[in-house]
Each structure stands twice: as C-alpha cells, then as structure tokens.
Amino acid sequence: MKYKTLKGLQDILPPDISIWQQVESRAREIFRTHGYQEIRLPIMESTDVFIRSIGETSDIVEKEMYTFLDKGGRSITLRPEGTASFVRAYVEHHIFNNPPPQKFFYMGPMFRYERPQAFRYRQFYQIGAEAMGTDDPKLDAEIISMLSSILFSIGLEGLNFEITSIGCKKCRPDYKTALKEFLADKLDGFCSDCERRYNLNPLRILDCKVPACIDSRKGSPPVVDYLCEECSEHFNSLKHNLNLLQVPHTINPNLVRGLDYYTKTAFEVSSESLGSQKAVAAGGRYDSMVDEFGGPPTPGIGFAIGMERIIPLIKDSDDKPEGPEIFICPMGNEASEKALLLAEQLRSTGLWVETNYDNTSLRSQMRKANRINAKKVIVLGEDEIKTGKITIKDMAEGENIETLLQADEILKSLGREKM
Ligand code: HAM
C-alpha cells in the first residue's frame, strides 16, 4: 500500500463513528443541563501558551509537543491539551467579566508525540469541560459528579474515581522541601531527567515513568500530609460534597498529574480493562493560571475525557447499525429515474432514503437492502409505474402498506408530515 495513516494516528470510520456521535450527544445533553456552553478553539497556539501553563519540566513540554516554526519564523505548537488554550481565550476575550461561574465545554483533537501503544495515540480526541470564577469545593464536587453522569450515561461500568489535593502556592514549598529531603540520598537511582528535575521541579519526579525512578521514589511523603489549613478544609469539603452527591470515589494520596498547573483538587477516572493506559478521564483545579496569563486572579477547574479510551469500553452491543427508513428498488431505466426523484422528495421530510443506481436484479437489490438494514422497501417495476400503485414492504415482517406512487401519499401512509 502506498499511503497509510501516520504512526499513532487513526481513521475513525463507520460503524464506530455512530458510537462516537452517541457519546458526544450524551455529553452535550449533560453539559446543557449543567449550563456549560460550547467553545471551539484553534488546534494550534503560540508555543509559549503551553510552556507557561503545562510546565517546562513536564513530559508533555519536554518531549511530546508537535512544535514547528511557521513561515514567519514563529514557534507554533499543535495543542497537546485544551486547558491552556481555553485559559488563553478566557483572558483574551475578557470572559472573566461575565457573571461567575462561567462554564464551557469543548470537543476536539489533541496532539502528543508519545510512544504509540494500545489506547495511546499521537492524535487523540478529548471532551473537556472548564468552570471558572469560584474556588468553592461544591463546584469541584459538582463537576466530578457531572463527569460521572457522562461516563455512566454511556454505560461504562467498573470505573475507579480517584481524588486528591495537591495543595497550593502556600503549602507547596514545604512539601517540596520534604520531598527533596526524602529523595536526597536516592539520586543515584534516577534517570538523567529526574536528576535535573530534582533541583528544577522535584514534584515532576513523582510522574516519571522510568521503572528505576518509580522504584527509587517508593515511600515518598504524600502531598496531602502537607496541606495548609485552607487546602485541607477545601479537600474535606470536597469529600463531604462528593458523598452528598453520591459520587463513588477513593482517595489516592499518591495521585500525580502530568501537568504543572494544578492546585488543590486533582482527580483521575480509570478502568482496569484498559491495561497500562487506564486513565479514561482526568482533571483538577487550576487557581493560578488565569493570573499567570495576564488576567485577574480567577480560580478554575476542569476535566477532559479521552475518547479513544472510552469508546472501546462501551459495551459493544450486537445491535445492527441503524439503516435507512426506505430503500427503493427500481427495475429498469424509467423506474431508475422515478426512484431518483422520489428519493429526493421523501428525503426533504427528513427521512433517510436510499435507492439503487445500477441495473441489478431485484434479488440482489433486496439482498443489499437487507445488508444495510433498511427498514422498509419499495419496489418500482413496470407494473407499479403503469398502475401508479406500490407496496411499502416492512423488512421486519411488520405490516405491508399499499399506497399510491406519489411522495405525498407515501408520506401520509407512513404517518409523516412534509417538513
Ligand atoms: P490529561 O490527563 O493529560 O489531562 O488528559 C486527559 C485524558 O486524555 C486522559 O485521562 C486520557 O484519557 C486522554 N489522553 C491523554 N493522552 C492520550 C493519548 N496519547 N492517547 C489517548 N488518550 C489520551 C488534560 O489534558 C487536562 N487538560 C484535563 C483538564 C481539563 N484539567 C483541567 N481541565
């Protein structure tokens, strides 16, 4: 074969696409009931947007960004995630002037130059949500509850919701000191990246995937033990409100996120069925990012669901894919033209109608109608054209309907009004 998709990319084809659309429409519905509005952001940004927010020493920025110079010599990056772009837009369009909380969602492709493996792609799709303007833990609980509603509504089971708090600017310095003290005599066991991170950003060592580093950092103190009073209260209130909303969750004091911008609440939803790439969704609070992007200090919280991770989990029922409402089988040239016109007339009312274009036998047309799961079939032969009468045959052995060969009559007998 001459051309193939690039490594780590995939085509999404029918019938899978209908599962994608179902997930998207469920999510849209749940966003609507929670007051989240859609935003569409560019898929590329100035590279600085990501470096500033995700963090210079994160794996994403250090190793995974698709960065290039455009023809004007500017450094451009394909978005590896949505939050940084969202905050850039939030500040650029002064959205902070709207009454809080301002709630948004997005759907679209993200790009990370990671080693491709099952459920890990270089272009992958996220459904994300961001809520701005309040740091009240009730909002944290509500957004996690909304995430659980989306995941449960599409039939996912056996998910593990893990939450933690990773502190704020106030408590982090103490934690960093404690972590560095703990790691000080273990540096020899670390990869060269982590050796560097030790001084630059020791928290990133907790996220390193190198087996030797995972081993060496075992037993490191959890950040929840170093929370300041404010963060501690915030975390307690989050737990209380999650219980109130009956969101099943566990506390994982060792949960680490791969992005630097998080403060206080962080969470991850995983499924053991996915193996090593088990995170299906993740998110957290980012109370300093708007400020760092030049806006007024504004707290925010959000999450993103990984589409390629949830689609395989959706119990693939044996349901046949949806087929057309009507398949018209013309016999001969005159009937072919009539079928072409009739199909267009019926479609104008919103019906999905298919017809046959080449001159094949009735038997082969019926087989095709069956294969594409057509619900009803109309045969258009010489007799039908001569008498002006047709039969709408129900493929599921329901009632056959006799009617006239006119779009209006057909629609009437199907109980459909013209649009
Ligand atoms: P993240 O944890 O980097 O967070 O990604 C969220 C989800 O995207 C992951 O849990 C996973 O399901 C999916 N994902 C990530 N990388 C890949 C990949 N290479 N292939 C397939 N799926 C992938 C964020 O992106 C944050 N922006 C979430 C957020 C929103 N935090 C606050 N607001």
Image (spheres, rainbow, N blue to C red):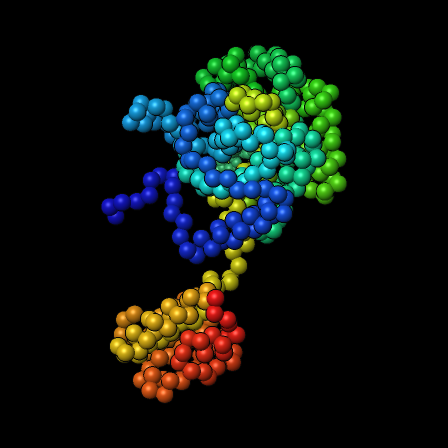
Residue most toward the left?
A: 2
Is residue 338 something that shows in the picture?
A: yes
Q: In this view, does 176 lie above or below 145?
A: above
Residue 11 as seen in the image, left or right of residue 224: left
Residue 120 as seen in the image, left or right of residue 7: right
Looking at the image, which residue is at 66% across and 17% down?
171
Looking at the image, which residue is at 46% across and 22% down?
51
Looking at the image, which residue is at 35% across and 39% down?
7
Q: Percent position (x, y) of residue 151?
A: 59, 46
Is residue 256 something that shows in the picture?
A: no
Q: Is residue 138 above or below residue 73?
A: below
Residue 98 picture quarter: top right
Instruction: Compare residues 55 and 194 and report the one nearer the observer.
Output: 55
Q: Percent position (x, y) of residue 220?
A: 62, 20
- Counting the numbered discs, the total is 0
Q: Percent position (x, y) of residue 8?
A: 39, 39
Instruction: Compare residues 344 and 79 and report the one nearer the observer.
Output: 344
Residue 221 picture quarter: top right
Instruction: Compare residues 22 and 133 and report the one nearer the observer.
Output: 133
Q: Percent position (x, y) of residue 97?
A: 59, 30
Looking at the image, which residue is at 49% across and 28% down?
92
